[in-house]
Image (cartoon, helix red, strand yellow):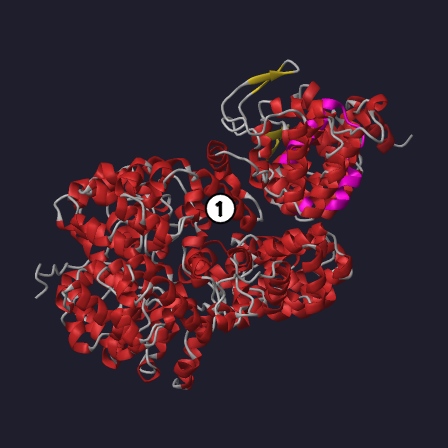
Amino acid sequence: MNHAEIAHSQNSEDLPPLLQKAVEELITGKYLNALLDILHFQSSNVWTADMLTKVMAYFHAQEVMFTLSSLQMSIKSYLKNLLYQPRQLLSEFQQLDQQQFQTAMKHLFNSRKHHLEMGNIILDWDKTRERIFQSPGVNRTLFLITLDKCFLALSALDCVDILSQVLRSSAVNYLQPDVTRSLPNVLQEDAFRNLSTVFKDLYDKTSANTQRALYGWMKQILQKSYNRSEFNESTSWVSAENLRILGRYMVHLPIEEILKISLSEIRLFISYDNATKQLDTVYDITPELAQAFLERINSSGFDMRNTSTIYRQDCISFKAVYGENELGLLVCFYDDMEQMDAAVARALLHQMIKCNQLKGFQAEVQKLKSQLLNIAMQNQTLNDILGSLSDAVVGLTSSQLESLSPEAVHNAIATLNQVSGWAKSQVIILSSKYLTYEKVLSFYNVSQMGTLVTGIGTQSFYSMNPKELSQIIRGTTSQYLSDLSPAQQQGILRKIAASGDFSSSIKAIQGAFFKEISLSDLWKQTGYNSSMMKEKELRRSQALYLYELLSKKNYPVDLLSTGQLVKGVTCQHVESMGTDFFLNTFKLFEKNLHLLSPYQVNCLAWKFWKVSNASIPPFLLLVLPIEYLEYVSGPLCIPFIESLGKTEMDLLNPSLHKKNAVLQKVQECLNGSIADEYDVDQLGNLICHLPPAFLHGRMSLKAMATALHQFKLCQQLSHEQKTEIKYKLLELYGSPNNWTAETTLDVGPFIALLSKGELNVLTEKFPDIILQIVKTIGPISSAEELLSAVFESVSNATASIESPLTRHDCLGTRTPSSDEIIKLAEANVFWSVQELKCMDGGTFDKNVELLGTVSGFNSSQLIALKEKAKQVWGSLPDWRSYHVVSLGRIALALTEHEIEELDLHSIDTVSVLSQQTEWTLTQARSILQGFLEDSGQTISTLKSFDLVGLGAVLCALNSTEIMSIRTAEFSAAVARIGLLFCSTPVLRQFKKITESVFGTATSWNGSILQEIGTIAGGLNEDELKTFDKNLMPYFQPIAIRCIPPEIFQALSPEQIANLGAENAAVVTRLQRDRLNASQLQSLQLALDGARTSTPETHSDASTTQVVQTPAPSGE
C-alpha cells in the first residue's frame, strides 16, 4: 500500500461510518446529503473537539484543499444557490435516502433550533428557514417531495401536518386537479380526517376543478371504508359521518346520490352539534341540491316547520329547527309555502339573514323573502311586526318605510341597526323616523343606530353637543364613521374643532376618519407623540408635517414603525440616515412599500446604491435609470424576478420605456420562456405585465394551468394580453361547447373574450354560473358581448306576462321585472327605451337604486327612467330628499329647469348629486343655485361641510363668489377641494383664497403643496418659476396635469428634472409639446429616476410654518 492509501485507511477507521459517508459526500459536492448526514449523526452523538481535526485530516489525505472557512463558505453558497433553483432542489431531494429525508423534514418542520452547529461551522438556521418558506418555488418543491416521499418515510399523521404547513402558504397554485393522482389512496383514519380538514379549510382558495377532483379523492376513500355489505345500488355510501367529513365538499354530491341517503343517517347528521355550522358554509350550493337535501330532511320525519317544540323520535332529541338555525344555508331555498303561518314565515326570515353569503341566486332569495314577507304580514300591520322581519326589511319599498310610525322604528331599532344591504334612501327614511321619535340627538341615541348612523343629516351632526360628538368618536359607533360621507365627517370635525376639546379628540380619532382633519387644524394642536399615530390613516400632507414635527423629539425607528408616518419621510431624511441605521431599518420601508410614493422609493434606491450596492434589494433597481438593470444577470436573475413578483410594479410607477426594459430583462432571466409552474411561481404579479407576444409563443400549457389564477388577479390587462390568454385557455380546455361547469367557473371573467356563439352555448348550459361571473366584471365596455348574451338568456327565460292593466302604448312590449333587473345588474343596459317606459311603477320604485348604478345607460334610457320616476313619485317639488338620492345616474337626465324644482335644502342630498361626474356646467350651476335658495344661504355663510358636500359643483362658482368664501371654512375643506378638476380660472381664484390661509404661494412648503392638490394648477408663471427644485416632487400628480401648457413651459430644466418619476409620467402631450430640447432632456431624466443632485437640507419639504390663523369671521 502506498502512503496515501495507508493514511486514508487510518483516517477512515478513526471516523464513525456516518460521518465518513458525510465527508465523502462533501468531497463529491453532495452538500445537501452531507449536511443531513452530519445533522443526523449529531442527533445521537456528541461532537468532540478532535472530530473536526479528523475530518480535516481526512480531506488532507484525499488531497482535497478545504480550510474550515472555505468549507463554511462553500456550504453557505451552495444552500443559497439551491434556494434560487427549486427544480434542482427537487432533484436533490428525490435522491436522498430515507434517513436523510426524515432528517430534512424534522429540521424544516419540527426544529426549534436557531442555529445549526457542526463543530466550528455555524449556519443561521432561522434565516435560512425564513428564506425557504418565503420562496414560492421552494415551497412547491417541498409540497411535491412530501407527496412523493413522505408517506413512505414518515408517519401519515406527520406527513399530513407537513402538507398542511406547506399548503397554507399558497394552496391555489400547488393544488391543481392532477395533484389528486399523487395523494395516497389508502390512509389511516386519523390522517385522512386531518388531511380532509386541511382541504376543507382551503376550499375557497382552490379552483372549481380542483374542488371537484379533491371531492373525488375523498369519495373514493370514504367508499372503501364504508361497510360493503350495506352498500348496494339502492343505498348510499353517504352516511351521517361521511357527510360530516365531506364538509363543504358535500355540494359536489350528485342529486341522485343525495336522494338515496338513508333517512336514519340524515336524521343523525342533522342532530350533530356542528351540522348547522357546516350547512352555514355551503356558499356555492345550488337550488336543486339544496331542495334535494331539504326533501330528504323532510322525509326523515324532521318537522321542518316546528318553531318552538322539542320532540323525540327514534330516541334522538331534535332541537327546534328555527330556534337553532338547523338548516343553515339550505333555508335560502325553502319553497314549501302552502298553508304556512305568519310565525313560521318570520322564523324563516330570521334564518335567511345569512343568505347574502351565497355565491349566487340572490334574485331567487329576494323573491323568496318577498313571498315570506307577505305571509309574515298577514293580519298584521307593518308597524307591529317591523322588528321581527330580520333583514327582509331591506325589501320594503320607500313608500312602505315612509308609512311606518316613528314609534315602530324606535321599537325595532335593535333589529334594524344590524341589517346590512340597506339602500341610501331607506337609511335616510329610517334615521329620520327614529330621530323624530327621539327628538334630541344624543350620544346614546346615535350609538343605538348602528348601520343607520349614515342617515343622520350633516346639519344634525353639526347641531349636536361637541362633548357628545367626542364620545361618538371614541365609542362603538366609531366603526361606522368611515361609512359617513365626507360632508358628514366634516360636520362632526368642524363642531369639535370649534369647541375646546379638539386636541384630545384628535388623539382619539382613528382609522381613515383622521384623514379628514385639515393641515391647518393639525398645526393648531400640540401634544402629538408617535404611539398615537399607530391607529390612524394619514394623508401625505399630514404625514409630512407630523414626521418633521415628531422627529425633533422621537427616534426615527419609532416613527417608521408606526406605518403611516413613512408617508412623511423626505429624501433629506433618508439622506441623513447613517449607513448601519439605514440598512437595519430598511425592512420597515419594505414592509410599508404600498404607502410610499415612487419618489420616496427612488430616494431609498439611491441611498441603498450608495451605501451597499452589492446587497441592494433587486426590486429597487426598477426605479433607478435603465442602465442599472445591467447589474442583473446570472445568480441575481432569480432574486430579481422573485423580488419584483412580490411587488406591485404599478406602485413603483416606471415609465413605459423603463417597464419594457425591465420586462426584457425578465424574459432574458427566464431563458426566453415560461416553461412550467416554477416559472409562474417566480413571476408572481409580474405575469400581469408580460407582453402579448411573449404569452403567445413562449408560455407552455403546463404553465398556463397554474397561471390562470394569477391572471385573474391582474388589475389592468390590455385587450391584446387578454386575447392571448383566451387562445391559451382554448388550447388548454378545448372548445367552450365541451366545457364543464367547473371549467367555466375557473375561466371566470375571461369568458368575456369568447365569441357571441360560444357565450350563448355557455349561458344556455350554465345560466347561474354565468350570472355569478358577470357580477364580478366591471363596466359594459369590457364585456359587451357577454352582457348581451346574459341579457338574452335572462329575458328569454322569464318572458314577462302582460298585466291586464298594461297601457295601450305598451301592448306587446316586454316589461322588465324585479327578478330580471336584479339578475342583470350591468346588463340592464340592453333594455330598450320603450321597455323602460313600460316598466311597472312598483318595479321601478323597488329597483331604482340598482338601475341608478348601471354605468352604460345612454341619455335616452336615462330620460325614460327619469320620466318613470315623475310618473311614480309625482311632480318634482313633491320629491323628498330620499327620492333624489336614490336616482344615482338617472339624475343626470334632469334639465336645469327640473333641478330648480327639486327641494335641495339638504347638503346631504347635494353631496350625493355631486358624486356624479357627468354634470354639464349649467346643470352644476342649477344645483348650486337650488341649494343656496332652498337652504337660505349665501356663499359667504357656507360652512366647510357645505363646501365639501358641494364637491364638483364648486367648479360652477364665479370669481366673485369664490372670493366671498370664508377663509376659515375654506382652510378646513381645502384638501377635498384640491381633488376637483375645475377650469383654470376657477383654480386661480382658489389659489388666491389659499394664499390667505397658507401665506403667499412662494412661501409654500411640501406639506402645503400636497394638501392643496389641483389648486396648485392655478399658480401663474412667475410663482411657478420661484419654487425650489427640491419641492417639485411634492406637487400632486393631479396638480401637474392641471397646469396649463403655456405656464408649464416656464419651469426651468432643473425644476423639471426634479419632478420625480410619478409627476413626470403625468405630463400631458400638450405640456410636452411646449418644452424645448433642454427641458425635454430633463423630463427624461425625471422619468428614468436619475439622480440630478444631492438633496439639500435647507429646502425641507415639511418645515413647520408660522400658522396664519384666520379671523373667525373669515375677513
- The location of residue 674, given as percent across then percent down, is 71, 59
Q: Which amino acid does label 1 sit on?
A: Ser
Residue at image coords 15%, 44%? 465
Quarter of the figure that contains the C terminus = bottom left
Quick check: can you spot residue 221? yes
- Which of the two residues, 837 or 201, is positioned nearer the viewer here? 837
Q: Mark 1 points at which residue?
A: 370
Indicate the quadrant where residue 193 lies.
top right
Reply yes or no: does residue 646 show up in magenta.
no
Indicate the quadrant where residue 1059 lies.
bottom left
- The location of residue 645, given as percent across then percent down, is 58, 55
Indicate the quadrant where residue 923 lies.
bottom left
Count the numbered circles shown: 1
Q: Is residue 679 left or right of residue 376?
A: right
Task: Identify the magenta region.
Answer: 173-200
Tag 1 secondary structure: helix
Quick check: can you spot residue 72? no
- Mark 1 closeness class: few <14, some 14–19, many ≥20 residues within 10 Å: some
Residue at image coords 13%, 67%? 940
Quarter of the figure that contains the N terminus = top right
- Which of the two residues, 980 or 314, is positioned nearer the viewer here? 314
View extreme (right): residue: 1
Residue at image coords 78%, 37%? 148
- The location of residue 354, given as percent across then percent down, is 50, 39
Examine the rendered structure and indicate whether residue 251 appears above or below residue 299: below
